[in-house]
Image: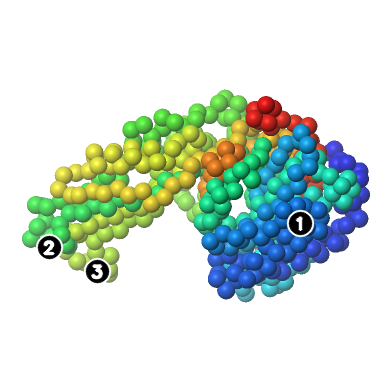
């Protein structure tokens, strides 16, 4: 393992007690964004972070207002000629129930047996603390940072991030940077370092099928009017074939193919089907043929019925032909699929295959674009070097199957697809009782950040910064 600059290491060793005390102090603030009664606590957490940023020597540190909970912004921009990195984390946390399953009160955190236990320890206050302490180590020992840094700490990540996309758009010029790093993820199985290169996008739709003006008697009218529930079932059955291939014309046109190198990299990640079966209770794994499990999660789009309803739902029987039937249908999208264009294609296809005798409406309930950083991008390579140098293991490059709204915002508002460099241990119990971060992940992760900032100092991260 490559050690970081000895002066930084000495500073970090000398300050470990203060660092852990301040980590616990932040964890004691119950900043649950989903519960209105904690709005003042969220603000208190934001103010606590701003005070810390001012203390360690950041500039423009401010609690910035949105229509909801505030965002913390601060920067340090005196590394002339060096790249500018924007770091995103969130200071809000999940609700804490069920309370009786916690080892201690969720906002009465403690450090024991190599674990920091408390709500937010891993997701995501621990990672904010890591970035603050890494920056502090530089400023305390050198008086400067090797790169320019902009911090953006959100307060609504756990309650749907409605306001940050607006704030990003309003502050676009001020947030200009060479790369965005999100520290809100974690390591792979076995606590092996991992970098998440991308996230899938989302298209969320609803199909409404209407037949007769109301439910009608299935004896009096059965066989002469179309049944909307049957019609909806036929439509859904034609959305995918039996190999899991989505039948909407042009659906795969913009999907980036996996290169042989990517396939090899994905194949080298040890993943166990049994774990998926155990976690889900599914009796077997299914999906698009020709792709491995991780490829299907990270690199291929999906189409799923999320809910379906219509007609009689009660106990016993009621002999009707329902007047209406409905389904919520969503697609997870991958680069370079465009949700708005795909919605039009999906809608047209559904209308084309709809049987006569019913009216069909397809509505777009919301969407987000996919985002990706390629593994050979300089920021991804530098992050991988930093993890290997400090944790002593090459990280896995993975692509997430989910979607994070703010990631899309960074990609499409700032033009910088974010790299997800997170440090939480995979068994962190995020969102659950007894959330914890391993002290080793926290401490070594601070060294990773220090190593990365020093490594990036002389790099050009994209064409614009070369020019
Ligand atoms: Zn989080």
* Residue of label 2: 217
First of labels 3, 1 by sequence position: 1
Q: Residue furthest top?
A: 260
Nearer to us: label 2 or label 3: 2
Label 1, on which residue? 53
- Residue 437: x and y in percent read 72, 57
Q: Nearer the viewer, mark 3 or mark 1?
A: 1
Work out whether residue 366 or residue 292 is closer to the camera in this orientation and state it: 366
The crowd level at tag 1 (other Cα within 10 Å; few <14, some 14-19, many 20+) is: many
**Mark 3: secondary structure:** loop
How far apart in space, not on screen, are marks 1 and 2 (Cα)? 69 Å
Q: Is residue 242 visible?
A: no
**Is disc 1 placed on a helix, strand or loop?**
helix
Q: How did the renderer colour the structure?
A: rainbow
Q: Is residue 51 above or below residue 347?
A: below
Q: Position of residue 382 (x, y in %)?
A: 73, 35
CA gap, disc 2 to disc 3?
16 Å
The image quadrant of residue 217 is bottom left
- Could you say where residue 355 lies in the image, as x and y percent from the top left? 19, 44
Residue at which label 3 appears: 316
Question: 25 and 415: which one is in front?
Answer: 415
Upstream in sequence: badge 1 or badge 2:
1
User: Cβ–Cβ below 8 Å for labels 2 and 3?
Assistant: no
Local crowd size for mark 3, using a 10 Å CA cut-off: few (<14), some (14–19), many (≥20): few
Question: Split into 4 quadrants, where in the image is the C terminus?
Answer: top right
Decide: is 275 above or below 379: below
């Amino acid at each position: 393992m490559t050690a970081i600059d000895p002066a930084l290491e000495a500073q970090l060793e000398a300050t470990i007690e203060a660092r852990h005390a301040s980590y616990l102090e932040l964890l004691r603030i119950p900043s649950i964004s989903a519960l209105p009664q904690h709005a003042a606590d969220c603000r208190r957490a934001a103010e606590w972070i701003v005070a810390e940023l001012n203390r360690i020597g950041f500039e423009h540190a401010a609690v910035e207002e949105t229509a909801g909970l505030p965002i913390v912004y601060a920067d340090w921009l005196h590394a002339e000629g060096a790249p500018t990195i924007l770091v995103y984390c969130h200071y809000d946390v999940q609700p804490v129930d069920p309370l009786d399953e916690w080892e201690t009160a969720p906002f009465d955190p403690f450090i024991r047996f190599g674990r920091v236990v408390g709500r937010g320890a891993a997701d995501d206050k621990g990672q904010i603390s890591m970035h603050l302490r890494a920056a502090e180590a530089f400023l305390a020992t050198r008086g400067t940072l090797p790169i320019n840094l902009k911090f953006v700490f959100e307060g609504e990540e756990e309650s749907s991030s409605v306001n940050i996309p607006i704030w990003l758009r309003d502050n676009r010029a001020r947030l200009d940077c060479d790369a965005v790093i999100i520290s809100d993820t974690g390591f792979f199985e076995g606590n092996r370092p991992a970098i998440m290169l991308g996230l899938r996008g989302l298209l969320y739709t609803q199909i409404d099928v209407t037949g007769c003006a109301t439910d009608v008697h299935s004896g009096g009218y059965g066989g002469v009017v179309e049944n909307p529930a049957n019609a909806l079932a036929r439509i859904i059955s034609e959305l995918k074939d039996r190999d899991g291939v989505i039948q909407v014309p042009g659906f795969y046109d913009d999907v980036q193919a996996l290169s042989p190198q990517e396939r090899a990299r994905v194949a080298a990640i040890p993943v166990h089907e049994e774990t998926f079966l155990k976690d889900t209770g599914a009796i077997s794994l299914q999906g698009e043929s020709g792709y491995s499990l991780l490829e299907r999660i990270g690199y291929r789009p999906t189409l799923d019925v999320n809910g379906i309803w219509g007609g009689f739902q009660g106990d016993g029987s009621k002999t009707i032909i329902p007047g209406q039937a409905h389904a919520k249908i969503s697609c997870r999208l991958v680069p370079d699929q465009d949700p708005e264009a795909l919605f039009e294609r999906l809608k047209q296809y559904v209308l084309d295959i709809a049987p006569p005798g019913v009216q069909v409406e397809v509505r777009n309930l919301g969407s987000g674009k996919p985002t990706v950083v390629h593994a050979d991008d300089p920021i991804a390579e530098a992050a991988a070097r930093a993890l290997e140098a400090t944790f002593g293991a090459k990280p896995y490059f993975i692509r997430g199957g989910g979607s994070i709204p703010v990631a899309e915002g960074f990609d499409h508002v700032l033009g910088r697809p974010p790299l997800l460099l997170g440090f939480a241990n995979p068994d962190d119990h995020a969102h659950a009782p007894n959330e914890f971060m391993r002290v080793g992940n926290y401490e070594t992760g601070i060294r990773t950040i220090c190593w990365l900032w020093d490594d990036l100092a002389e790099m050009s991260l994209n064409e614009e910064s070369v020019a």
